[in-house]
Amino acid sequence: MKVRTELDSPVPSFQRVELTASTSPPQPPDEIERITPELQTNATASSQRALNLARQIICAIAFTTVSTLNPQCAARPLRRRFEIVAVDSLPAEVDPMLVGQIRQMFERGASEFFEDGMDSSFARELVLSVIEHGSATIDAIAEYLFSTTANFDVGSEALRRIADIKDRRSLASRWALLQRSLKHRSSRVRDGAILGFATLDDHRALEVLKSVETEEPIPELQKLIQKVIEQLGVTHVETAAQG
Amino acid sequence: MSKLLRKVRQNRWYKDEAAPLLARGDVPADPLGDLNTSQNKLSVYQVDEDLANVERIARALALSCHHVDNVCYITFDSSLLTEASIEFDHTDEGGTYDHAVNKCHVDLINLSGNKLVKLARLILSEGESDTILKKRINELIEEGINSKELPEKVRDKLLKS
């Protein structure tokens, strides 16, 4: 089966080749040649040989460069799933300018009334920032959310929304922020984190939620955690059934 | 009437956090935001005594929003209305995609600030809040379309969620 494989960093156009399924290592050049589109040309036999040679050289360079950009690529099969980042591995330094922008965004958000299922200017701005800056925005949100002046109502809304963004680049940092927020001093922030994990619907959060279930002091939140655990349990079974 | 339901954001209705203010005869201000009135009326939905139609009402309310999401709600006994001297009116049907749910619509009428605060206090003391997760809401919508309880056109909202 052929699939397009996402790489973390943009790949220059000459490297845009199709790779085999995520469970397989990069293919040898002859395999690549088979899936490289045929060029429309009237070349003679000798120029065709030269063209084939050039094509193989380009493929070799492409693989060398891909391997350099991402050493794991050459060493082991390409992975389509992200690695869960430990909570204590959040970056210590965050772009102060971005933190300032995020703070202003949250302050503007404080004037809005948030309802489930309803759009908000804050949510639109937040999503755009994540799309533009990726994990840097998530790090800046974390910096703000764990500051002494954070607005927890807006923070809760932010955690719900960041879970719903389809952006693979920032998934690991979003996961780490949700996990860290499960132990936030504000019940509203914890609520946003629990619902964020429900939205991600990734069974790997089962252990994360189970670890905080008994520590949660608000009965309504404890019940909510149990609901999400139940949902993720079903997701786990479904995922396993799909192989 | 039996029980009534109002869609809210659950994290504004935690009983433990409201308890200190309730003990002083006061109420937290944030829950009042979920009781926004229009022409001194507040929309609620009538729920079966055994809460059997809660999911169906929640599904209809989810479809009335911009996008399908979790639905948080509070339920409370209709006897609280008498306690808060609140009148109600069944005349106007709801405007959701589910005709059966529309018939459960009830307006609490002639509300004043004092009555609203009293209702909030009673709900915080005696009502219950809960959340139906988005994934379940999506399943309910799918079931609703298949059983013809919901029109086919709501599938668009399902696809966007």
Image (spheres, rainbow, N blue to C red):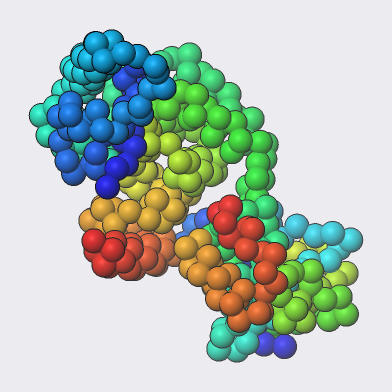
In the rendered image, is residue A189 in sight?
Answer: no
Q: Is residue A146 above or below residue A55?
A: below
Residue at the farthest left position: A75
Q: Nearer the viewer, residue A24 or B120?
A: A24
The answer to which of A54 and B71 lies nearer the viewer is: A54
| Side (left or right) of B33 relative to B160 | right
Given residues A30 and A217, the one toward you in this image is A30
Q: Position of residue B117 (x, y in %)?
A: 72, 62
Q: Where on the picture, by quarter, is residue A228?
A: bottom left
Is A11 displayed left or right of A115 in the figure? Answer: left
Q: Decide if residue A185 is in sight here.
A: yes
Q: What residue sits 49% from the left and 57% below the top?
A: B17
Is residue B138 rendered to the left or right of residue A31? right
Q: Nearer the viewer, residue B92 or B95?
A: B95
Which residue is drawn at the image coordinates 36% and 29% (left, top)?
A37
Q: Residue at x 55, y 76 (%)?
A: B143
- Write down the quadrant of residue A181 in the picture: top left
Q: Is residue B36 left or right of residue A240?
A: right
Return the x and y of residue B147 as percentages of the image width and height: 61, 81
Residue B98 percent location from the top left of the image:
71, 75
| Residue B92, position as x, y percentages in the image | 86, 75
Residue at (52, 27) in percent of width and height: A129
